[in-house]
């Protein structure tokens, strides 16, 4: 379970080219990245055997809340390939994901 979360964080922290290469052209690539993270986060937070520190939980919740805000506040302009490559919002997603990886004691492989 934690491995899936780390993999989703690594993908969110990865450079735009890596993120965009992950999904087929017809998919809403940025949406898929966010959904993968949300699914992995739900599995981890619902598992009573896993105990996250408050700092780990805070970093994950901050990223989750930011992704939800992005999804709800735009008409789709942040879901484009150009936005993933160049927007300040996606740069912040990468920083938040990298911070969460650090809190979990994981390192980016991408």
Image: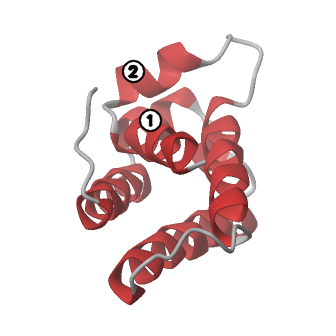
Residue occupied by mark 2: 18
Q: CA distance from mark 1 to mark 2?
A: 8 Å
Kindly give the residue lying farthest to the bottom in the view shown: 54
Where does residue 14 sit, x and y in percent of width and height? 33, 34
Would you say 75 lies left or right of 68 here?
right
Residue occupied by mark 1: 11
Task: Identify the residue at image location x=65%, y=51%.
Answer: 40
Task: Identify the residue at image location x=44%, y=35%.
Answer: 11
Q: Is residue 3 above or below residue 72?
A: above
Q: Count neighbours of disc 2 (C-alpha within 10 A) and say few if under 14, some if 14 to 19, many if 20 or more.
A: few
Kindly give the residue lying farthest to the front in the view shown: 49
Where does residue 45 sit, x and y in percent of width and height? 65, 71
Q: Quadrant of residue 92?
A: bottom left
Q: Is residue 103 above or below residue 14?
A: below
Tag 1–tag 2 contact (CB < 8 Å) = yes
Q: Earlier in the sequence, mark 1 or mark 2?
A: 1
Looking at the image, is mark 1 or mark 2 nearer the viewer? 1
> Who is closer to the viewer here, 49 or 60?
49
Task: Identify the residue at image location x=39%, y=21%.
Answer: 18
Q: Which mark is residue 44?
A: none
Q: Count neighbours of disc 1 (C-alpha within 10 A) and say few if under 14, some if 14 to 19, many if 20 or more.
A: many
Question: Quarter holding the C terminus?
Answer: top left
Task: Identify the residue at image location x=46%, y=27%.
Answer: 19
Q: Is residue 20 above or below residue 41?
A: above
Secondary structure of the residue carrying tag 1 is: helix
> Who is closer to the viewer here, 52 or 95?
52
Secondary structure of the residue carrying tag 2 is: helix
Would you say 98 lies left or right of 10 here?
left
Q: Quadrant of residue 10?
A: top left
Q: How many discs mark residues in the rendered view?
A: 2
């Amino acid at each position: 379970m934690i491995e899936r979360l780390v993999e989703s964080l690594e993908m969110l922290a990865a450079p735009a080219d890596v993120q965009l290469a992950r999904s087929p052209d017809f998919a809403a690539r940025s949406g898929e990245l966010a959904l993968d993270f949300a699914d992995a986060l739900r599995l981890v937070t619902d598992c009573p055997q896993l105990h996250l520190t408050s700092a780990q939980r805070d970093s994950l919740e901050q990223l989750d809340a930011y992704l939800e805000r992005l999804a709800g506040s735009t008409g789709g302009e942040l879901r484009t390939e150009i936005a993933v490559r160049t927007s300040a919002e996606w740069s912040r997603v990468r920083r938040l994901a990298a911070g969460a990886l650090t809190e979990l004691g994981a390192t980016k492989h991408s």
